[in-house]
Amino acid sequence: MKVQTAFLIITFIIVSKICFGQTGYEELKNENFDEAYKKLLPLANQDDSLAQFCIAMMYDAGKGLKQDQSMACHWYNKSGMNGHPIAQLYLGSMYESGQGCQQNMDSSLFWYQKAAMNGHPDGAFNLGKLYEMKELPFYNDSLSIIWYTKASELGHTRAMGKLAVKLFLKQDLIMAHVWSNIAAENDAIQKGTSTRILVEKYMTEEQIEEAIKIKLEKYKHWKELKEN
């Protein structure tokens, strides 16, 4: 799933690169992987983060190169160090699972944070998940809420549902209602609706009215993010 999603993303990026006459990307788009690798490797060795990311994906998916997740991790690392947010996200996932590299939750945290700071909603969401894992030494529920909030502000609907539950448990009923309401109108429909119904049982009419006003403001912002 990760590889398939990334190749769709690459295809989109490639189109914009072709407009600027960049070598290697047209071959990749046409699935001429051997030629693409030959042209992308010099760019990757010059610290072009997108070229590095594409080579990592080729190793990851076994496209034009023998599938090798350790080499994929090597090139994702180079790309991530040069600021590519999706490479940073994938590194977080690889270190979390131990896929292609030795499992290291501190490294996973580091790369998810890099991706989140680069504005990737999945990076922020995954940070929220890591910080709420009590078995990890850096468990911190307050930081989990902060990162779920960041992910929610970036339009991540699963984060909205998780954030709503956490805020309800913290007795922040208004904001719990806000995020469950937004989640209910998007992908996390069932969970968001059930959380909103539960929260409303403990709220006054005035609190519900205030929550709806805040929700309308945030929902407008979230819709703008989705459209862009």
Image (tube, rainbow, N blue to C red):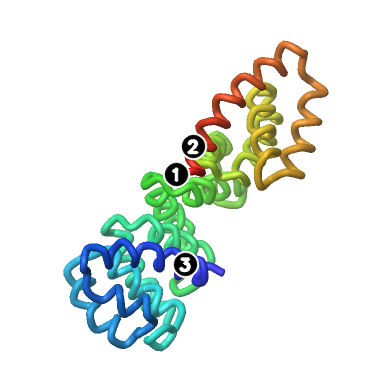
The residue singled out by tag 3 in the image is 8
Residue depicted at 46% across the width and 62% down the height: 104
Find residue 33 and report its horizontal and vertical position in percent.
35, 84
How many marks the image carries: the answer is 3
Q: Residues within 10 Å of mark 1 (few under 14, many from 20)?
A: few
Crowd rating for badge 2 (residues with CA inside 10 Å; few <14, some 14–19, many 20+): few
Residue most extreme to the front: 19
* Residue appearing at x 66%, y 39% in the figure: 183
Residue 148 seen: yes
* Tag 2 residue: 224
Residue type, numbered disc 3: Leu
Q: Are marks 1 and 2 in contact (CB under 8 Å)?
A: yes
Comparing 149 with 51, the one in front is 51
Q: Which residue is mark 1?
A: 228
Badge 3, how many Cα within 10 Å: few under 14, some, many 20+? few
**Amino acid at dot 2:** Glu
Q: Which mark is residue 193?
A: none
Q: Residue at x 51, y 66 (%)?
A: 5
Residue 98 is at least partly visible in this image: no
Three-letter code for the amino acid on which mark 1 is drawn: Asn
- Quadrant location, the N terminus: bottom right
